[in-house]
Image (cartoon, rainbow, N blue to C red):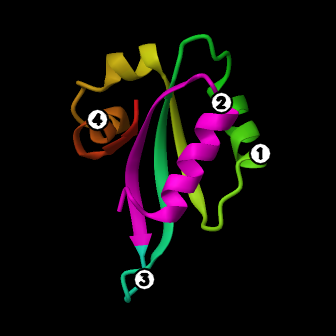
Amino acid sequence: MKDNQYIKSAQQKLIDYCSNITRIYLISVKVDTMGELKSFKLGLIVDNSVKSTSELAGHLYFYVDSELPYDLVIYKEEEFESLKNEIGTFAWKIYNSGTVLYG
C-alpha cells in the first residue's frame, strides 16, 4: 500500500511543506470491500526544534490537501525515541508495525 498514489502524493506534499519532518510512517489504511483505499494514517517524526506538534498538525491539515481523508500522528524525535520501546504506547505500535515511507 505504500506505493499508492494518494499516499505518495500526501507524503511528498508533507515533505515539501515541512522541512522539520525526519521520518514518515504509514500507520494504517482503510479500504472498501473492493480493496480500494478510502483513508490512511501517517506518523510523522519531527525534529526537536518544533515548538508545538498540535500547532504543526493544524498547519499541515490546512496546507496539505489530499484527495482522500488522512490522519496525522506527530511526535518530536526525543519523545518518539523515549516511547518507541515502551510496550503498549502508540509510539511502540508505530515503530513495530508501521511502514517507513521516508527517513
**Labels 4 and 2 touching (C-beta < 8 A):** no
The picture quadrant where one finds residue 2 is: bottom left
Name the secondary structure under disc 2: loop
Describe the element under mark 4 as helix, strand or loop.
helix
Pointers 4 and 3 in contact (C-beta within 8 Å): no
Q: Read off the magenta span.
A: 1-30
What amino acid is labelled 2 in the image?
A: Cys
Residue 54 lies left or right of residue 4; in this view the side is right
Inspect the image, locate mark 3, and give the three-letter code of the amino acid beneath it.
Answer: Asp
Tag shown at residue 32: 3
- Which quadrant would the C terminus be assigned to in this image? top left
State the CA–CA distance, disc 2 to disc 1.
Answer: 10 Å
Q: Where is mark 4, residue-wise?
A: 95
In the rendered structure, find residue 63 and report the number of the disc placed on it. Answer: 1
The residue type indicated by label 4 comes to: Tyr
Residue at image mark 2: 18
Q: Nearer the viewer, residue 10 or 84?
A: 10
Q: Quadrant of the N terminus?
A: bottom left
Give the mark nearest the N terminus, 2 or 3. Answer: 2
Q: Position of residue 47 (x, y in %)?
A: 53, 16
Rounded to the nearest whole Å, what is the CA distance between mark 1 and mark 3? 27 Å
37 on left or right of 10: left
Q: Is residue 25 left or right of residue 64?
A: left
Q: Name the spot of residue 54 as percent of width and height, x first.
A: 66, 32
59 vs 99: above or below:
above
> For the point 38% across and 88% down, which residue is it?
34
Query: Where residue 11 appears, x then y in whole percent?
Result: 54, 46
Q: How many marks?
A: 4
Mark with earlier residue (2, 1): 2
* Residue type beneath disc 1: Tyr
x 39%, y 23%: residue: 80
Alpha carbon separation for disc pair 4 and 3: 26 Å
